[in-house]
Image (spheres, rainbow, N blue to C red):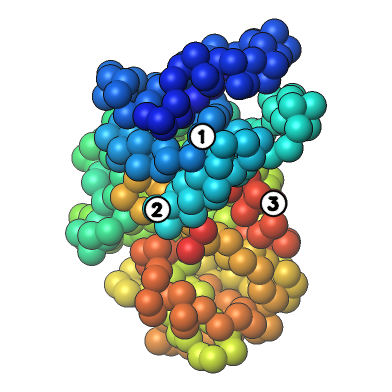
Amino acid sequence: MKVLVLRSLFQSDDFVKTEYADLISRLEKECGAEITVISESTDWKSMCFKPDYLMIATGGVENLFKNIFVGTWCAASKHTISIIADGRNNSLAAALEILTYLEEQGDEGAIIHGTNDEIITAIHANENHDVPTISSKLRGTRIGLFGYPSDWLIASGVDYDYLREFYGVESVYIDLQRLIDGIHNVPTAEAEKVADDIKKRAKSVKEPNEADMIEAAKTYLVIKEICQEERLNAMTIRCFDIVKVCNTTSCLALALLNDEGIVAGCEGDMQTLLTMILAKRLCGEEAFMANPSQLTNHTTLFAHCTIPLAMCDETIIRSHFESGLGVAIQGAMPLTDYTIFKWGGQRLDKFIALEAKAVENQYSDHFCRTQIMLDVNLKPYLLYRTIGNHHVIIRGRHAAEIRCFMKENGISSI
C-alpha cells in the first residue's frame, strides 16, 4: 500500500515525521504502508505512480495536488482517490478543497478523517472490502468484430489497445468475406432444421418466406461456428453489409446467440456491446440493444429489429425494418420493471443507469420491429447529454447495483 504525504513549503519532512509519528508508524506496521513525503520543492514530476492513499499533512498543498494530478494522474483511468486528513495543521481544510476539485473534474474522492484509531480502522475496512472491478468482470473476454463499425456510428467507437491494456479484453477482427463465403457453403438441410424450430416457437410468421428463413438460419450457423473457432464469447457485426451482399440479415442470429450465452450486438457498436457484456456479468441479465425512438414528457419508446428470444413472452417473425429483407424479430416483452443502462464515452468514463416500468408493447410501421414503451422521461438526458444512440434494456431493477459498481470503479454518472 502506497501513501503519498503532501506538505507545504512552510514545514519540513522532519516536522511531518515528528508531528505524525504515531500515525505513520501505525500505517507502516498495521497496514504495510510505504510512506513518501513530498512538497513543491520535491521532483514530483518523476512520481508517475498513483498512490493508494493521499495523506494531507498541512494546509497550502492544494496547488501541489493540482499540479501532480494534471501532470501525472489525470490521463490515467479514473479511480476513487482516498484522502487521509486528521484535521491538524489545516489538513482537513486542504482536503476539502482537493475533494471539491476532484468532483469538478468528474473524478471521485473520499476523505478519511478522525483519530488515529478511526483512520486505521477505516483503512482496514477499505482494504478488506473486496470491490469487484470492471477488469475482473471483463478480463479474458474475446470480442469478434465482424467488419468495422457502421459508418453512421461516429461517436460509439473504442480504443482497442486501451480495452486490452486496462480491461483485458481482446478484439478479434473477422473479415466479412469469411462470413459471406460460409453462408454460401452451409448445407440447406441443416439450416432448414433451425428455421423450422424458430417457426414453431413463434406466434406467427409475416413477411419472410421459406427461403428467407433458411438464409437467416445459415447466417446464424456460420456466425456461431466462427465464434467457436475463434473462442469468442461476444461479437458485433457490421450488419448492413450482409444485407447488401447476401439479401439476408443477422437479426435472427444475434437473437439466438444471446440466448446461448454469446453476447451479440448490432452495427459494430462496441460501447453498447461492452454495456451488454457488463450487464450480463454484473446483473446476470440478457440485454435488448435498442434505439431510443420517440420521446414524450412521460414515456420513452425503444425499438430494434433483434432481441434475445428469452426476453420475450412471444415473438412474431418479421422482415428487417429498413430494408424489408431477411428475418427480424418482433418481440412482446413482459410489462414489468426494467433497467436502462449505457456505458460509454471516448475513454469509457461515463455511464447512465435508471429504472422504469414497461407500459406497452406497441407496434407501428414507422419504427424497428420490437417496440417497448417505458414510463420514463429521458428528454433531459437524451436531448442534451446522451451517451450515443444505442442503449440497453435489462429486466429487473438493477440501477442501484450498477451505480455502486461503476462509482467504485471511478466511472462518472451522467
Q: CA distance from mark 1 to mark 2?
A: 23 Å
Q: For the residue carrying disc 2, how many other residues have a C-alpha within 10 Å: few (<14), some (14-19), or many (20+)?
A: few
Q: Which residue is mark 3?
A: 401
Q: Which residue is mark 2?
A: 105
Q: Type of residue at label 1?
A: Thr
Is there any visible trace of residue 263 in the rendered image? no
For marks 3 and 1, the one nearer the N-term is 1
Identify the element where label 2 is drawn.
loop
For marks 3 and 2, the one nearer the N-term is 2
Q: Which residue is mark 1?
A: 58
Q: Which mark is residue 334?
A: none
Q: Type of residue at label 2?
A: Gln
Where is residue 155 drawn, in percent x and y? 27, 59
**Residues at discs 3 and 2 in contact (Cβ within 8 Å):** no
Q: Is residue 300 above or below residue 392?
A: below
Image quadrant in which you'd find residue 371? bottom right
Residue pictured at 64% horizontal, 40% vertical: 87
Q: For the residue carrying disc 3, how many other residues have a C-alpha within 10 Å: few (<14), some (14-19), or many (20+)?
A: few
Left or right of residue 307: residue 155: left
Where is residue 273 drawn, in percent x and y? 44, 49
Q: Is residue 115 above or below residue 154?
A: above
Residue pictured at 54% horizontal, 26% vertical: 52
Instruction: Give the foreground label among 1 and 2.
Output: 1
In the picture, the quarter occupied by the N terminus is top right
Identify the element where label 1 is drawn.
loop
